[in-house]
Amino acid sequence: MMSSSPINILITDEPLDVTNCSQWVMTPESGGIDVFIGTVRNATKGKTVLRLEFEAYQTMAIREIEKIAAAAFEQWPLQKVLIHHRTGVLQVGEIPVTIAVSAAHRDAAFTACRYIIDTLKQTVPIWKKEFFEDGEVWVAAHP
Amino acid sequence: MFLYLLSHYLKFFMTITVLAFGVAKDIFNAPSIQLELVNDATVMSLKYTLEQQYPRLKQLSSYLIAVNNEYALPEDYIHQRDEVAIIPPVSGG
């Protein structure tokens, strides 16, 4: 990713650095920065979750995330957009996804940030497996 | 008979690799499989062939096929050397 680009996309098996993410979207023209941090929760539907594993179809996931970032720039007056997603095994409290959006005014930053995480969950080929005390399951795979 | 065999032969078969992720990798018991298809196979016929060989695919809530890193429509054609992947319901974020 060239530093001059207003879009920063990464899929990595290394821990995400939230501070660097929010700093990256800062520009002198920005009046607000929205950061969404997804974290691993210790339970799903009342059942204890020990850890999660994320798997990505790397090349396609990058392309789908690029489409989401481009669509956000088309819809709202944004300064910069950063979308980082983690793969591999994550423990409770760790961060699978970080989204940072800067804009001159907060409305655009709030709305775009929400649009990006909601769309990412619907279209980007990344899968999550939940590990319980008595087994493991791919989320949303079965009715 | 000869003409039938000839046309069958001329139609050619292609072997494609289908990448699998998430629950599909568990169903295939492998990160990818080889599949023999006729040359003008569509995404729909690919899904039919897959479900014949791996009936557990039919138990998924849904799944899509990606061709060359793009979601494909049922009527889209699959060509030799296309990168084909099975996309179970996504759950990132």
Image (cartoon, coloured by chain):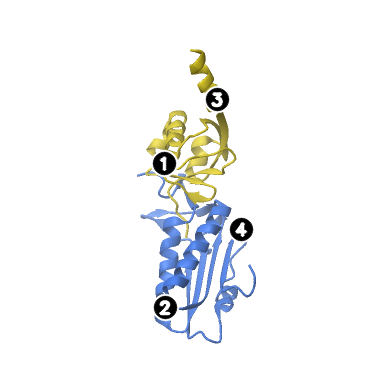
Q: Position of residue B30 (x, y in %)?
A: 57, 37
Q: Residues within 10 Å of mark 1 (few under 14, many from 20)?
A: few
Q: Position of residue B81 (x, y in %)?
A: 60, 40
Q: Residues within 10 Å of mark 4 (few under 14, many from 20)?
A: some
- Tell me the distance, in whole angstroms, between the alpha carbons under discs 1 and 2: 38 Å
Q: Position of residue A60 (x, y in %)?
A: 54, 53
Q: Position of residue A33 (x, y in %)?
A: 49, 80
Q: Residues within 10 Å of mark 2 (few under 14, many from 20)?
A: many
Residue extending furthest top? B1
The three-letter code of the residue at mark 4 reads Asp
Disc 4, SS = loop
The image shows residue B71, relative to residue A38, as above or below, that is above
Can residue A96 be seen in this snapshot? no
Q: Which residue is mark 2?
A: A108
Of the pair B34 and A100, the residue shown nearer to us: B34
Disc 1, SS = loop
The image shows residue A44, relative to residue B55, as above or below, that is below
Q: Which residue is mark 4?
A: A13
Q: Which residue is mark 3?
A: B10
The image shows residue B80, relative to residue A139, as above or below, that is above
Q: What is the letter of the blue chain?
A: A
Labels 3 and 1 within one chain: yes
Q: What is the letter of the yellow chain?
A: B
Residue located at (42% from left, 44% from top) = B63
Nearest to the eye among marks 3 and 1: give it.
Answer: 3
Mark carried by residue B75: 1
Residue under mark 2: which chain is it in?
A
Can residue B26 be seen in this snapshot? yes
The three-letter code of the residue at mark 3 reads Leu
Disc 2, SS = helix
